[in-house]
Image (cartoon, rainbow, N blue to C red):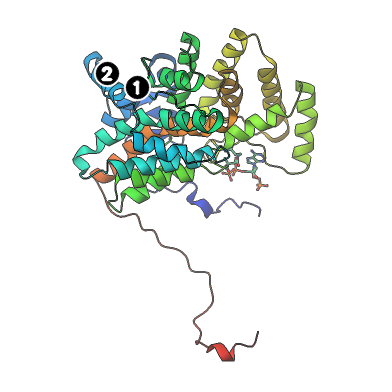
C-alpha cells in the first residue's frame, strides 16, 4: 500500500507521551541520552556509565560507578534452576525466544514484589542476560556447561569472554562498549513502547521486559542486523553486491539495515558503528565485509536515497568479533534492557494506563441472525 503524507498507521509522528530519557532527532537535537550526545557517549563513556545515566538521569561519580559495576559483577551467576531450563531449549530455537524465556524464568524465580526494588531487578537483568544467551548457546551447540561468571571488568568484556571462552582484547571490548551504548536507548521505539504499555498496567518489571523482548524480535525492529549479515554474506565482492542489490531493488525487495521510521536523511549511530567496523577489519586484516557493506551503502543512497541505519554496519563488526549471526539480536536485548527498565521506571513514576482509542471502520450496526438462518 502506498504511504500517504497524512498516513496515521503505526502512530508515526504522533506524540504518545513524555520522556526525559532520550531525543531521537525530531526536535533538531540529534540522538541524546538524558541530554548527552550519542557521539560523545560512544567515544568516551563505558556502557555501565550509560546504563547508570539512564537509571538515574545523571552520569555516575567514580564511587557510584564502582558500586554499580560491583552490583552487576556480583549478580552475573545464573541460578541452577535457570540453567536447567536453558538446557531444555533445543539448539534450533530462535535465540530471541531463549532470551524471552530466560527473562520470564528470572521473574518466576525471584519476582518483583515491590516497585521499591525495581532498580535491583533492572541490575539483575543487565547482569544475567549475557550469561543466559551464552550458557544456552554453549550447552545446546557443544554440550558444554560453561561457568556463568567471569573476571571481566565490564559487561561487554563479560559477554565476549563467555561467548568465546577466552579473554577479549582491549579493542574488542571497546567495540562492544560502543555497540552496547548505541543500542541502549531510542525513545518510543516499538519494544520500548511495548514495555511502557505493559508497565502502565502496573505489572511487574519482568513481564514488561519479556513483552519488550518479544517485540524486538521482529525483523522490522531488532532482527535487522541479522538480516543485514545474511545480505552482505551473500555477496563475494563489492561489484557482486552492487549487481545483486540493483536486482533486489528492481524486484521491490526491502533491504534490511536501511531506512528508519524517524530519521529521514541519516542515522547518527551509523557513522560510529561504521568506524568500529572499519577499525576491527583493519585489526583483523580482513576488510572484505566492510568493503561490501560500503558499496551497499553507496548504491542504496544513489538509487533510493536510503541510508544505512544502526544495524547495517553492526553486521560486519559483530561478525569480525567472532559473534554468530543468530546472537546479534540477543546482544541488542543485553543493551536495550537498560533503556527499557529506565522507561518502565519513568512510566511508573507518573503513571496513567495507556489505553488509546481506535477509529471504527467496520460494519454498520446490524441484527443478529441465528445460525440456521445463515445461508453461506
Ligand atoms: C525501518 C522501517 C521499518 C521504517 O519504515 P517506514 O517508516 O515505513 O519507512 P519510510 O516511510 O521511510 O518508507 C518510505 C518508502 O521507502 C521504502 N523503504 C523504506 N525502507 C526500505 C528499505 N530498507 N528497503 C527498501 N525500501 C525501503 C518503503 O517501502 C517506502 O516505500 P513506499 O512509499 O513505496 O511504500 C523501514 O525502513 C524498513 O523496513 N527498513 C528495513 C528494516 C530495518 O533495517 N529495520 C531496523 C530499523 S533501525
Q: Residue furthest bottom?
A: 373
Assign a secondary structure to mark 1.
helix
The image shows residue 70 at horizontal and vertical percentages of 27, 20
The quarter of the picture where residue 218 lies is: top right
Report helix, strand or loop for mark 2. Answer: helix
On whether ligand 1 comes within 8 Å of the CB at mark 2, the answer is no
Coordinates of residue 182 in the picture (x, y in percent) = 46, 26
Judged left or right of residue 49, residue 251 is right
Tell how many labels: 2
Q: Position of residue 22 (x, y in %)?
A: 38, 33
Neighbor class of circle 2 (other Cα within 10 Å; few <14, some 14-19, many 20+) is some
Question: Disc 2 and disc 1: Cα gap in Å?
Answer: 7 Å
Q: Can residue 223 be seen in this snapshot?
A: yes
| Drawn side of residue 51 relative to residue 273, left or right | left
Picture quadrant where residue 259 is located: top right
Q: Residue at x 58, y 50 (%)?
A: 5
In the image, what residue occupies the spot 34% across and 27% down?
77
On the image, which quarter does residue 19 sit in? top left
> For the residue with label 1, is its CB less than 8 Å from the closest atom of ligand 1?
no
Per the image, the residue denoted by label 1 is 48
Q: Does residue 301 appear anywhere in the picture?
A: no
Percent across and percent down for residue 44 are 40, 14
Label 2: which residue? 65
Amino acid at each position: 500500500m502506498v504511504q500517504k503524507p497524512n498516513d496515521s498507521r503505526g502512530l508515526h509522528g504522533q506524540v504518545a507521551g513524555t520522556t526525559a530519557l532520550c531525543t531521537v532527532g525530531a526536535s533538531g537535537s540529534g540522538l541524546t541520552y538524558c541530554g548527552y550526545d550519542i557521539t560523545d557517549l560512544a567515544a568516551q563513556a563505558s556502557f555501565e556509565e550509560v546504563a547508570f545515566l539512564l537509571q538515574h538521569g545523571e552520569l555516575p561519580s567514580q564511587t557510584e560507578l564502582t558500586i554499580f559495576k560491583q552490583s552487576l559483577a556480583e549478580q552475573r551467576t545464573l541460578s541452577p534452576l535457570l540453567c536447567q531450563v536453558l538446557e531444555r531449549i533445543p539448539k534450533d530455537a530462535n535465540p530471541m525466544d531463549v532470551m524471552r524465556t530466560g527473562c520470564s524464568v528470572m521473574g518466576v524465580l525471584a519476582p518483583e514484589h515491590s516497585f521499591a526494588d525495581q532498580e535491583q531487578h533492572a541490575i539483575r537483568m543487565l547482569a544475567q542476560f549475557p550469561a543466559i544467551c551464552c550458557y544456552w548457546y554453549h550447552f545446546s551447540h557443544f554440550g558444554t556447561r560453561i561457568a556463568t561468571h567471569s573476571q571481566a571488568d565490564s559487561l561487554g568484556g563479560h559477554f565476549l569472554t563467555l561467548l568465546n571462552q577466552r579473554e577479549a582484547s582491549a579493542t574488542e571490548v571497546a567495540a562492544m562498549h560502543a555497540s552496547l551504548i548505541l543500542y541502549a536507548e531510542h525513545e518510543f521505539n516499538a519494544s520500548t513502547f511495548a514495555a511502557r504499555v505493559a508497565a502502565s498496567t502496573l505489572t511487574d518489571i519482568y513481564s514488561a521486559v519479556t513483552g519488550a523482548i518479544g517485540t524486538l524480535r521482529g525483523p522490522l525492529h531488532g532482527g535487522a542486523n541479522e538480516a543485514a549479515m545474511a545480505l552482505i554474506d551473500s555477496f563475494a565482492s563489492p561489484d557482486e553486491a552492487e549487481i545483486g542489490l540493483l536486482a533486489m531493488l528492481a524486484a521491490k525487495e526491502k533491504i534490511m539495515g536501511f531506512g528508519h521510521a524517524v530519521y529521514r536523511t541519516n542515522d547518527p549511530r551509523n557513522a560510529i558503528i561504521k568506524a568500529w567496523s572499519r577499525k576491527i577489519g583493519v585489526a583483523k586484516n580482513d576488510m572484505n565485509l566492510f568493503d561490501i557493506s560500503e558499496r551497499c551503502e553507496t548504491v542504496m543512497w544513489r538509487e533510493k536515497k536510503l541510508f544505512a541505519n544502526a544495524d547495517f554496519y553492526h553486521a560486519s563488526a559483530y561478525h569480525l568479533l567472532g559473534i554468530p549471526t543468530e546472537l546479534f539480536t540477543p546482544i541488542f536485548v543485553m543493551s536495550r534492557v537498560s533503556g527499557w527498565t529506565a522507561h518502565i521506571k519513568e512510566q511508573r513514576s507518573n503513571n496513567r494506563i495507556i489505553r488509546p482509542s481506535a477509529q471504527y471502520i467496520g460494519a454498520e450496526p446490524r441484527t443478529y441472525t441465528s445460525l440456521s438462518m445463515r445461508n453461506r
